[in-house]
Amino acid sequence: MDILIDSHAHLNFNIFDKDREQIVSKCLDKNVWVINVGTNYETSKKAVEIAERYEKGIWASIGLHPINLDAGLLKLKGDNFEGGKPEKEFDFYKYKLLASSKKVVAIGEIGLDYYWRPKGKGKRELFKQRQKELLLEELELADEMELPVIFHCRLAHNDLIKVLKERSRTKNRPIKGVIHSFVGTLDQAKEYLKMGLYLGFNGMIFKAIGGISFEQIIKYVLLEKILIETDSPYLIPPKAEIDAEAVEIGGFKRNTPLFVGYIAQRIAEIKNVSFEEVEEATAKSAKDLFKIG
């Protein structure tokens, strides 16, 4: 049976409350498996609850996203699509209890995000330090629960690489995981690959971003080290915008795991291989990393 695995979606977000079950049903009918990813306690809890309703095909990842850390240094911009609220600190034991579910297959999305940052050098440095401290706390949870990590990184790849290298030296063991929605340079991609990490690609590969060549990076990365994802409800692929399954909400075209095939097809075109090769390789990698099957 051919399977596409969307390694990073947010069907746990509020924007899917009205038709979540229908979307999940369609995904399972089309052999699309989904890992729903938490961004704070409430969305993590919701991801677990959704996953536990299904015997197979739907899993959860839990974590506190760096932009949902309320360090008191920045007025946080809420996301109406998401749900939950920012947290002043990481409650290790509360998240650990969530992670005890057999349907939790990763810790994430966690990491560093320097896009929204406070004014003033002193506050910016403190802001970065607080995110790094949060990341290390969540990595401890991943270690304790023996789970891989889904990393979020925006405008912070050099810092994330430095943190992960230092932690691997300190712990004397590699970190297992994926760099979700990779948007970095080829050199940064090489550093992650040296650490044994996977790279996740989504609708960003259809965008033109200054200094970033997705074609160059995807050609370089072995197919076995690539995961495909949608990051639903965001980043809908251009061709999916006219798909019969595409829903517009308040002028926003909502992405869903049903569109993950568009990502696989684009990667196949770039690497000059068949769609089936991408489908098979990325599904195997997701199964290997997240221990699902």
Image (cartoon, grey):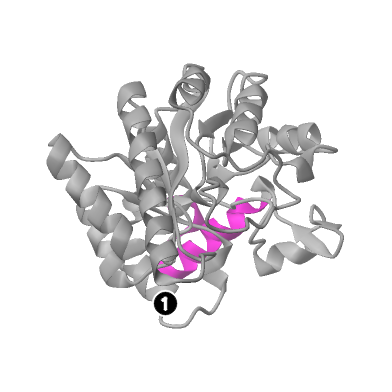
Residue 114 horizontal/vertical position (percent): 46, 63
User: Residue 52 occupies which quadrant of the picture?
Assistant: top right
Label 1 sits on residue: 212
Query: Relative to 18, is 237 on the left or the right?
Result: left
Q: Which residues are magenta?
A: 259-277
User: Residue 248 occupies which quadrant of the picture?
Assistant: bottom right
Q: Residue at x 26, y 40 (%)?
A: 175
Q: Name the quadrant of the N terminus.
A: top right
Q: Residues within 10 Å of mark 1 (few under 14, many from 20)?
A: some
Residue 281 horizontal/vertical position (percent): 40, 47
| Helix, strand or loop: magenta stretch | helix
Of all residues shown, which one is farthest toward the bottom? 210
Front residue of this view, candidates 148 and 293: 148
Instruction: Report whether residue 71 is seen.
Output: yes
Q: In the displayed structure, would residue 269 be above or below residue 47?
A: below
Residue 76 horizontal/vertical position (percent): 62, 55
